[in-house]
Image: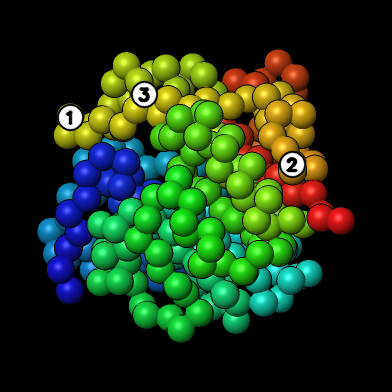
Amino acid sequence: MAGVDLSGVPETTLWTLRNRAEEAMRPGSYLVDPEAVRLYRTLQDSGEDFQRFGKLSQSHPLRALAFDTVIADFLAGHPRGPVVALGEGLQTTYWRLGRPDVAWYSVDLPEVVDAQRRLLPEEQAITRIGRSALDDTWLEEVAAGPALITAEGLFMYLPKDEVHALIADLAARFPGGRLVYDAIPAWFSTMTVKGKVKLSDRYVAPPMPHAQTVSEAARLTDVIPGVASVRDVLLPPGRGVWANPAMRRLAGAPWVRDHRPSITLLTFAETG
């Protein structure tokens, strides 16, 4: 099995894979992700330099668990899906959820989809679409109606107006559906644009020009047609300081919530 040659934003999928796999390999870890571990070890054996991503972080495995919970909640009411993963990269969500019998669509750039096909198991339930999430032609490949759409680690790399236009298109195509995505605060966005998020002497995080606060997300019902409700999704408990209940309370405090990364769950209006 060959390695993977990605650069720019697509390369970040290796960063998040490393953090998830390393957490999953810890004894007694809160994250069970055997497919991520398998893929990580395979790429290590092929010579992939994961050390360039610097220190380990719990932010990515905890984000993955938060997304898992949202997807599982949707599938409890819609057992056949569909689930649409925008910019899915080398995420292993489908296997972490136990290979659910749903229509699962993975939408990503052609070079990333090529890597998925070479490196991840082939699954009859998964349809891979090699297009940008902003290329709205992919919408026609998914049946209209309620769907769960994820954009994990994606929207911060895209222009704000194009993200809002995409959300409006999603709301029109998937009435009664839901969209879950993560966002970064303005201070962190500025650091990335200035090239100041240096993970190691070999890797600088790419620019993330799109920032969104919790308060800004709450106003999307008035900004984007078809958005019926907005919910701020907090990360689950992790290890160490991430397990401290005070951290969770602090994350919801008015003077903190607009300065931290966030996960937003949108519900789309029903038609008729």
Q: Residue at x 17, y 54 (%)?
A: 5
* Mark 1 crowd level (few <14, some 14–19, many ≥20, 10 Å Cα): few
Residue named by callout 2: 227
Q: Earlier in the sequence, mark 1 or mark 2?
A: 1
Residue 229 can be seen, yes or no: yes
- The x, y position of residue 229, in whole percent, is 79, 41
Q: Nearer the viewer, mark 1 or mark 3?
A: 3
Quadrant position of residue 70: bottom right
Q: Earlier in the sequence, mark 1 or mark 3?
A: 3
- The x, y position of residue 193, in whole percent, is 35, 20
Residue type pointed to by label 1: Asp
Q: Earlier in the sequence, mark 2 or mark 3?
A: 3
- SS class of the residue under badge 3? helix
Residue named by callout 3: 192
Q: Is residue 141 left or right of residue 256?
A: left
Q: Is residue 84 left or right of residue 188?
A: right
Residue type pointed to by label 3: Thr
Residue type pointed to by label 2: Val
> Whole-Å distance between the Cαs marked 2 and 3?
29 Å
Of 91 and 127, the residue lying toward us: 127
Q: Which mark is residue 201?
A: 1
Viewport quadrant of the N terminus: bottom left
Residue found at the far right of this picture: 272
- SS class of the residue under badge 2? strand
> Whole-Å distance between the Cαs marked 1 and 2?
42 Å
Q: Nearer the viewer, mark 1 or mark 2?
A: 2
> Whole-Å distance between the Cαs marked 1 and 3?
15 Å
Contact between labelled residues 3 and 2, with CB atoms less than 8 Å apart: no
Q: Residue at x 22, y 44 (%)?
A: 7
Viewport quadrant of the C terminus: bottom right
Vertical placement of residue 200 versus 103, above or below: above
Of 182 and 267, the residue lying toward us: 267
